[in-house]
Image: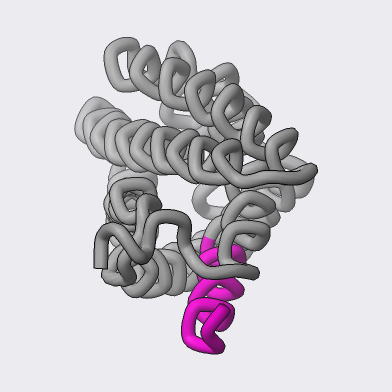
């Protein structure tokens, strides 16, 4: 195990774990508008914007760390490269989602009821990137699970969990991409679970050299 891989593994673990923590904080403390329609969104954005943008900015930093770390791990020889690339693409997709939120939600969410359909369009495209990013992350988690399952020892259990949660998260996010906001809670829950398990898998895998390094170097 090289120090470089170990450090990158810790960064990749943080890149997966930080968004899980921020999502839980967001849902526990901020939730969403108290009522549907423009009035609810306008009140929510106007009164809670400072807290909202703090959580989203923290999340964005986590995604950026995850992208850099995953790309570094994908450049190493071994059988995990496709999984790390998927996680990097997924982190970039969700980073774009938060960029839409930070850059546009306050302006469009308080622009008046006549512009509310435009705000909903921005909201939907933001969540499309969110679903896409989490779908790619979930399939990457499943790939990490396969790599863990191929190793001897108790890591096989975590490997199986990563495969199952990763595939479930991938399927839920595909449905979210197709149906939009109507499937947000189900897709969000599946994605958080897959990402949390993925953080554990990333940490476990990067404690030793990648499988297949000799064959793929």
| Residue 147 seen by the camera | yes
Does residue 48 appear left or right of residue 175 in this picture?
Answer: right
**24 or 91: nearer the viewer:** 91
Residue drawn where x is 53% and y is 19% of the image? 168
Q: Residue furthest bottom?
A: 3
The residue that appears at 69% across and 37% down in the rendered structure is: 156
Residue 10 sits in quarter: bottom right
Query: In the rendered view, would you say 112 is above or below 70?
Result: above
In the picture provided, is 37 more to the left or to the right than 124?
right
Based on the picture, tell me whether residue 88 belongs to the magenta stretch: no
Give the image location of residue 43, x and y in percent: 55, 43
Q: Which residues are magenta?
A: 1-15
Q: Nearer the viewer, residue 201 or 2?
A: 2
Measured as percent of width and height from the top left, residue 48 is found at: 61, 55
Q: Residue at x 30, y 29 (%)?
A: 124
The quadrant the N terminus occupies is bottom right
Count of numbered tags: 0
In the visual, does 33 lie left or right of 125? right
Left or right: residue 108 compared with residue 26: left
- Compared with residue 105, is residue 180 higher up or lower down, i.e. above or below? above
């Amino acid at each position: 195990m090289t120090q470089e891989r170990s450090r990158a593994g810790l960064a990749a673990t943080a890149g997966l774990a930080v968004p899980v923590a921020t999502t839980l904080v967001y849902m526990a403390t901020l939730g969403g508008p108290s009522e549907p329609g423009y009035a609810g969104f306008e009140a929510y954005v106007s009164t809670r914007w400072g807290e909202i943008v703090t959580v989203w900015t923290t999340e964005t930093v986590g995604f950026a760390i995850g992208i850099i770390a995953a790309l570094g791990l994908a450049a190493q020889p071994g059988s995990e490269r496709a999984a790390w690339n998927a996680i990097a693409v997924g982190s970039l997709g969700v980073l774009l989602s938060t960029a839409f939120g930070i850059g546009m939600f306050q302006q469009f969410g308080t622009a008046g009821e006549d512009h509310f359909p435009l705000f909903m369009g921005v909201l939907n495209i933001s969540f499309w990137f969110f679903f896409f990013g989490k779908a790619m992350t979930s399939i990457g988690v499943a790939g990490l699970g396969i790599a863990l399952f191929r190793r001897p020892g108790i890591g096989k259990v975590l490997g199986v969990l990563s495969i199952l949660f990763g595939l479930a998260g991938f399927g839920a996010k595909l449905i979210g991409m197709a149906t939009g906001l109507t499937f947000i809670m189900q897709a969000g829950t599946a994605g958080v679970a897959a990402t949390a398990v993925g953080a554990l898998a990333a940490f476990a895998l990067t404690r030793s050299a990648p499988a297949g390094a000799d064959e793929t170097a």
